[in-house]
Image (cartoon, rainbow, N blue to C red):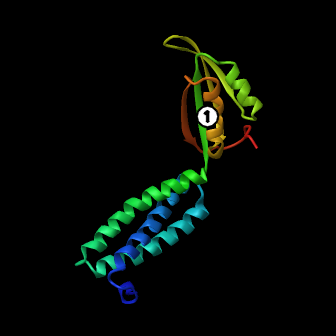
Amino acid sequence: MDLSLSIHPAWLPLVIFGLRVVDMSLDTLRVLLLVRGRRVAVWFLGFSQSAIWVVAISAVLAHLDNAWNILSYAAGFATGTIVGMVIEERLALGHGHVRVISSRQGTAVPESLRSAGYAVTELTGRGRDGTVSVLTTSVRRRDLDRLLRLVTGLDPSAFITVEEIRPLSRGHWRS
């Protein structure tokens, strides 16, 4: 397939850039879904991504004398990676394990989270300045901002970490 026959040479760098943005956006989503075990979606994304890549790289290789094509290919790669990250952030797929360490509002924070429908496990710990409450909960990523607002509203100095997780079985999930 000679893409350059149907596209004016002046437009070819823009087409290459656009193809590469789509290709890399799909690649970023594919890798993130791969980690989450979404096999069917990964297959379709991989198939689409590789077909788009073949068209884009063919257009570049057919016209290696045009530096704009090469620059467009590289810029599309970089831009597509960022676009894929933005899309994934908006989709908020997956789950996160939240750890909150509170030295001031140890009882108010878990009570507030439970009344909002989150399952919370409380532990007592010792920090630099004395006793702290260590709270853990696992939430869907789309609920993460709401949970963080609840925590920081009650204890703005709480130390909060979030880890990506892949739940295996049981437990309480906020509906």
Q: Amino acid at mark 1?
A: Leu
Residue at 64% across / 18% down in the picture? 105
Which residue lies under the disc numbered 1? 148
Lateral position of residue 55 relative to residue 136, left or right: left
- Image location (x, y in percent) of residue 49: 48, 69
Say which quarter of the image contains residue 11: bottom left
Position of residue 160 relative to residue 143, above or below, is above
The answer to which of 159 and 15 lies nearer the viewer is 15
The answer to which of 23 and 46 lies nearer the viewer is 23
The answer to which of 99 and 12 lies nearer the viewer is 12
Lateral position of residue 33 relative to residue 64, left or right: right
- Image location (x, y in percent) of residue 47: 51, 71
Residue at 71% across / 30% down in the picture? 113
Check the picture and name the quadrant holding the N terminus: bottom left
Lateral position of residue 165 relative to residue 175, left or right: left
Say which quarter of the image contains residue 52: bottom left
Position of residue 25 relative to residue 56, above or below, is above
- Image location (x, y in percent) of residue 66: 25, 77
- Image location (x, y in percent) of residue 153: 63, 28
The answer to which of 68 and 51 lies nearer the viewer is 68
Residue 36 in view of the camera:
no
Residue at far top of view = 130
Check the picture and name the quadrant holding the C terminus: top right
Residue 149 in view of the camera:
yes
Lateral position of residue 4 relative to residue 97, left or right: left
Position of residue 154 relative to residue 55, above or below, is above
Position of residue 162 relative to residue 12, above or below, is above
Residue at 69% across / 29% down in the picture? 120
Disc 1 secondary structure class: helix
Residue at far left of view = 65
Neighbourhood count class around disc 1 (C-alpha, 10 Å): few under 14, some 14–19, many 20 upward: some
